[in-house]
């Protein structure tokens, strides 16, 4: 089984978030970095993240990690801020 990802983030100040992330598999460890560029530059901070599959989490640095427990297609949404806040 696999859990495909669709990354959707609010983008402010010319920040561009790229995706999608690599596929994940139920019961297997997963770690992927969400990539952002532009704005006033990094480091970028991710917040207010929703829609993450059960077993996974998103850190403030944009790392999606954990072990997914449920197959499906998920739209992970949130906000990203550049060094200017």
Image (cartoon, rainbow, N blue to C red):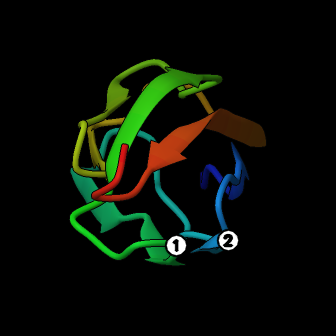
Above or below 37: residue 50: above
Residue 39: give its label. Answer: 1
Foreground of the two, 9 or 7: 9
Question: How many angstroms separate mark 2 from mark 1 (CA)?
Answer: 5 Å
The reply to whether residue 72 is visible in this rendering is no
Residue 19: give its label. Answer: none
Above or below 66: residue 11: below
Q: Residue at x 44, y 47 (%)?
A: 81
The location of residue 3, given as percent across then percent down, is: 62, 49
Residue, disc 2: 14
Q: Secondary structure at mark 2?
A: loop
Mark 2 and mark 1 residues within 8 Å of each other at the beta carbon: yes
The location of residue 28, given as percent across then percent down, is: 28, 50
Q: Quadrant of residue 16?
A: bottom right
Above or below 55: residue 61: below
Q: Residue at x 21, y 64 (%)?
A: 43
Q: Within 10 Å of the Cα at label 1, are there few (<14), some (14-19), or many (20+) other Cα atoms?
A: some
The location of residue 23, given as percent across then percent down, is: 55, 67
């Amino acid at each position: 089984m696999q859990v495909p990802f669709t990354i959707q983030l609010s983008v402010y100040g010319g920040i561009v978030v790229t995706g999608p992330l690599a596929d994940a598999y139920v019961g297997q460890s997963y770690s992927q970095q969400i990539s952002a560029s532009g704005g006033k530059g990094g480091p970028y901070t991710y917040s207010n993240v929703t829609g993450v599959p059960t077993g996974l989490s998103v850190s403030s640095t944009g790392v999606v990690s954990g072990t997914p427990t449920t197959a499906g297609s998920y739209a992970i949404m949130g906000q990203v801020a550049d060094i200017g806040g």
